[in-house]
Image (cartoon, rainbow, N blue to C red):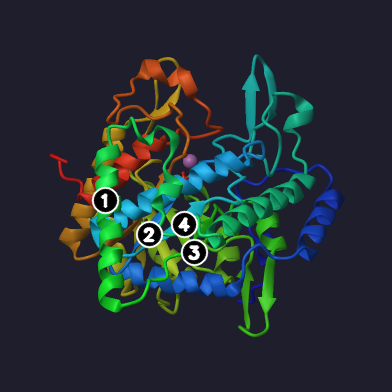
Amino acid sequence: MDWSPTSWQNRQAAQQPLYRDPARLQAAVAELSRLPPLVTSWEIEELKARLAQAQQGKAFLLQGGDCAESFEECQSEIIVQKLKILLQMSLVLTAGMKKPVIRVGRMAGQYAKPRSADEEVREGQSLPSFRGDLVNRSAFVAEDREPDPTLMLRGYERAALTLNFVRSLIDGGFADLHHPENWDLDFVGESAMAAEYHKLVKTVSDSLEFFELIGGESIETQRVEFYTCHEGLHLPYEQAQTRFLPHRKSWYNLTTHFPWIGMRTADPDSAHVEYFRGIRNPIAIKIGVSAGNDQLQKLIEYLNPDNEPGRLSLITRFGAAQVDEHLPRVIEAVQATGTHVLWICDPMHGNTESTREGFKTRRFDNIVEELKAAFRIHRDAGTILGGVHLELTGENVTECVGGARGLGEADLARAYKTQVDPRLNYEQAMEVALRIAGQLNDNH
Ligand code: PEP
Ligand code: CO
């Protein structure tokens, strides 16, 4: 069947805003289509090759960032903190797992969110749900909730600003393994995990020194790779930056390296699957408890018919209570297709709950439990868990409960800042990395 960047428009597209004025939407899409791309096909192909290595257990993927980025938080300090935590975690994982870590930030485009209802009702008034800064504004006021297509342009600009800053930091040597002191966050000194972290940093520095000594030259660690990902939810935005590259004879989504299909839009006959089918980026699908085996097998057939290495990742998100029931059957269904995927565990989205005070939260112990179970189940099935997908921030927020500092429900009100889902704070994220590095031992 013919594919084009607009062929998804012939299908039912879930989770899309209703723009009142189609001409304004067209104008915004046309303008976005003329602007330069945010990423390049060689970076995208490089990432695909790296994901293929993770599929074989020769590398490990660390994918993380905000549930929803906000335009407001496109600030140097916040971006630096997020980069720092991802770099620190990757260092811990490299040292602990003894394999290279592929870093992918939920950054520079994670601006659109799926919602459970199209409308939100408060005190008898019904307004369109807030769907992320790419679509509308969060205040519960009719004017702000009206989807505004020019916000796509503002989102593209914020993504470009974020990426430009991240690239400059990395090019300037910020991520150089020789200088991990660059990434110490303010409160690392008093953290319960500080000693363990510094021990791992020293292990990495010593290994580098050792190899430099026997190799007689310094190892180039300055140019680390850093990639971006976001949920490819808002199809007009994704479509606008989809380009045909004659030298590759293929179409690429050039807003991000690694887009994924969310759980709510992963119907094989959906507009989203139609769109993703035609781009050559590595892609991922979120798999929850409601994903049937037939659905999975169809998705694989549509999205990776050639069994291309690194092309397709499955991000499973069942929750600690249901992972044992669902992950084994999903692995079997994939094995039956004879094709290979990269298995990633998202221990966040199946473990969301609400406190009595009405805060959406996640328990640290459930997050670790799901991860542990995923490692065990894959080992038993002869498959490889090649990555982890986390919602985290480099800031000292109080959104998830538990962890070494023992955050309780009563602490949540102190610094609860997320726009949508609760994120691991700096220390909790670090602790997850240390637990994975220590193979999630109970006594760790
Ligand atoms: C998310 O990653 O923020 C999200 C909405 O996930 P899922 O599609 O798995 O629910
Ligand atoms: Co989320």
Pointer 3 or 4: first along the chain: 4
Q: Residue at x 39, y 30 (%)?
A: 400
Pointer 3 or 1: first along the chain: 1
Can you tell which of label 3 and label 1 is closer to the viewer? 1
x and y, in percent, of residue 224 in the image: 46, 64
Residue of label 3: 283
Residue of label 4: 175
Q: Is the C-beta of the residue carrying label 4 under 8 Å from the nearest atom of ligand 1? A: no
| Amino acid found under the numbered disc labelled 3 | Ile
Residue of label 2: 61
Is residue 280 visible from the viewing direction of this image?
no
Pointer 1 or 4: first along the chain: 4
Residue of label 1: 200
In this picture, is 391 found above or below 246?
above
| Amino acid found under the numbered disc labelled 4 | Ala
Q: Residue at x 64, y 18 (%)?
A: 122
> Is disc 2 in contact with disc 1, using a CB cutoff of under 8 Å?
no
How far is mark 3 from mark 2, CA to CA?
14 Å
Label 2: state its secondary structure: strand
